[in-house]
Amino acid sequence: MSQTPSRRRLPLAIVAITILTLAGVGALYAVVMPASSDATEPEPAKADGPIVEALPYEPHTWGDADAPVEILEFSSYTCGHCGHFHQDTFPVLKERYIDTGKARLVLVDFPLDNVAGAVSLVTHCAPPEVGRKLSEIFYADQQAWMTRTPAESIAGIARLGGMAPEDVDACLTNEDLYQSILDGRSLADARYDISGTPTFVINGEILRGAHDAEEMSAVIDAALEQAGE
């Protein structure tokens, strides 16, 4: 389980992420600038309201929106356990529950660092279907792209999704979108007191850390029974 930094609720800031090419080698730079003087902390989502509707951006989802079970996944693209979930556990849950209309999964970005934030940006700049596929690729190939130069790898995967180089550059300097992702992270932390990734909420029941397919299936089955399915 990847831990959040020592201060769980990181101060909100406008983070500009740019890709610069020097001598043919891509380098990822994260420039953190102080928030403007009139910036305010986002209001926490209401305790009795769906957090998905409160998010300031459209999350990636898999499955039927009317499925009786909702699986919220709070995840960071640089979190090893998150990568293992998508590589090993998610395919099983997808076959058992998502493809059969019993559950849907909602991925709520919870970036633990600026590299994860850059990946989040890229997946949300692309059209929804492409962005969701890019999300799957970043998790499936996590070890590969994280062990190379992050900037080159992120941009390369984005181009595979059909994004032009200039679109990637524009995306990685989109301060408004990055702020929305940070605001969504704060909403998630305020609601569920997230201490690390991955964290799952299955019809209101919180599962912290890594769980295998059988452990998660047991919780999903209980939620289906409670929903009368």
Image (tube, grey):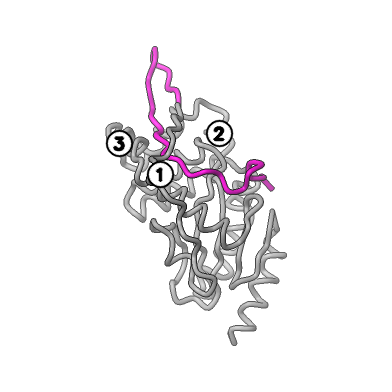
Q: Does the magenta stretch include residue 48?
A: no
Image point (38%, 30%), residue name: 18
Q: Which amino acid does label 1 sit on?
A: Tyr
**Residue 158: where, in percent of width, then height?**
38, 39
Q: Give the range drawn in magenta.
A: 1-28
Sequence-earlier tag: 1 or 3:
3
Q: Give the residue number, with chain letter if any, for mark 3.
A: 170
Instruction: Give me the C-alpha separation between circle 2 and circle 3.
Output: 25 Å
Q: Which amino acid does label 3 sit on?
A: Ala
* 1 and 3 marks in contact (CB < 8 Å): no
Sequence-earlier tag: 1 or 2:
2
Give 113 or 152, whichever is nearer the viewer: 113
Q: Residue furthest top?
A: 23
Q: Give the residue number, with chain letter if any, for mark 1.
A: 178
Image point (36%, 40%), residue name: 175
Q: Is residue 225 left or right of residue 179?
A: right
Q: Is residue 11 magenta?
A: yes
Image point (49%, 73%), residue name: 49
Above or below — where is 87 with respect to 223? Answer: above
**Residue 180: where, in percent of width, then height?**
40, 50
Q: How many labels does the image show?
A: 3
Instruction: Give me the C-alpha separation between circle 1 and circle 2.
Output: 24 Å
> Under tag 2, what secondary structure?
helix
